Amino acid sequence: MEHIVFGIGITALAGALATVAGSAEDTESNIGSQGDPNSQVQLAPQMGFLHRIFNKAVAGEPPAYGLWCCLGAGLAWAFMAMQINPVLAIVLGAVLATFVQGVYATTAYVGRTASLAKFGQPVFVDILKSMTTVTMAHAFIAIFCTVTLCHLINTALGHPFPLPLLGLIWGIALGAAGSATGNPYYGKERQYQNQKFGAGVPISASGNIVRYAEAGERNSIDNGWFTAKIGGSASGICFGMIVFLELWRTVVFEAINPWYAIIVGVLMILIFTVIDRYIEVWGRKTYGPYTAPKEAEA
């Protein structure tokens, strides 16, 4: 019984760390314009819409954060093997992984913008300097929290996987949570505020992103400020629930019978599927229609 109570406490702490990591990851992604929404930012100059939005995507969020969290966890693991304090080791690993993220962000922005030179898109040095440091700050929080929860899983819960492998797995999960939850909010609700709610992106509007903020031209800090309120929070809750519920069912049921943990996992998926379907139908009926009625089109 004491083992289960201790495990649930570690599970709650890991879930809290995951919530912070998910929020920071989504905000970092939105400021850097990474993932699916980046395609419209990349397309905008080709359609004649120049902008001041940071454009750093070199990969989707799951492989990117899989790399950074795996790198941070691997370095922390190596430092711990050198008898360095685990907290300091995790901090150092996260710092070095963040520097790698900054290099990727810098080269991606400059390289992508250089490829758009024939369309007249300039490289804004002030955007490069200011946005890179802000994305690095958010990336550090996401990497540090993820590596820390992996260390808790590895040591406190006795998971057999080595720390770098756990960093890779949970880093991919972190990027997937932010991409699936926060990116649509940034891509559709922020970039296309001039479109009808739920209408998606019409082909005629491809690349015609909203380029002006409340005061002056929009930049990525404006996007981060806007999406951190709801998109980041939703991503944090999403990743936090994934980590908490996954560890919870393992801690509580695997000690009794491993099959119980599997059955509970399947039941949880079915329950969330029903809830998601209900919310989708409710959203369509409440805020729809997704497309304009025929009489309005006429």
Image: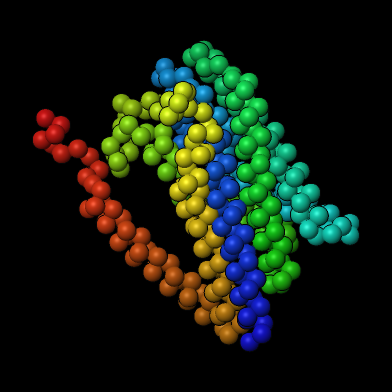
Q: Nearer the viewer, residue 274 or 218?
A: 218
Residue 114, image x and y in percent? Answer: 59, 19
Q: Is residue 40 visible?
A: yes
Report the residue at 57% width, 47% height from top: 25
Q: Nearer the viewer, residue 82 or 11?
A: 11
In the image, residue 224 sits, relative to residue 45, either above or below, namely below
Q: Nearer the viewer, residue 167 or 11?
A: 11
In the image, residue 283 sits, relative to residue 1, either above or below, namely above
Residue 271 placement, left or right of 229: left
Say how many tags the image has.
Answer: 0
Report the residue at 70% width, 66% height from top: 152
Residue 11 placement, left or right of 50: right
Q: Quadrant of the N terminus?
A: bottom right
Residue 112, image x and y in percent? Answer: 57, 25
Report the residue at 25% width, 48% height from top: 287
Q: Is residue 43 visible?
A: no
Report the residue at 62% width, 59% height from top: 17
Q: Nearer the viewer, residue 156 or 263?
A: 156
Q: Quadrant of the C terminus?
A: top left
**Which image quadrant is residue 270 in?**
bottom left
Residue 263 placement, left or right of 89: left
Residue 212, image x and y in percent? Answer: 43, 25
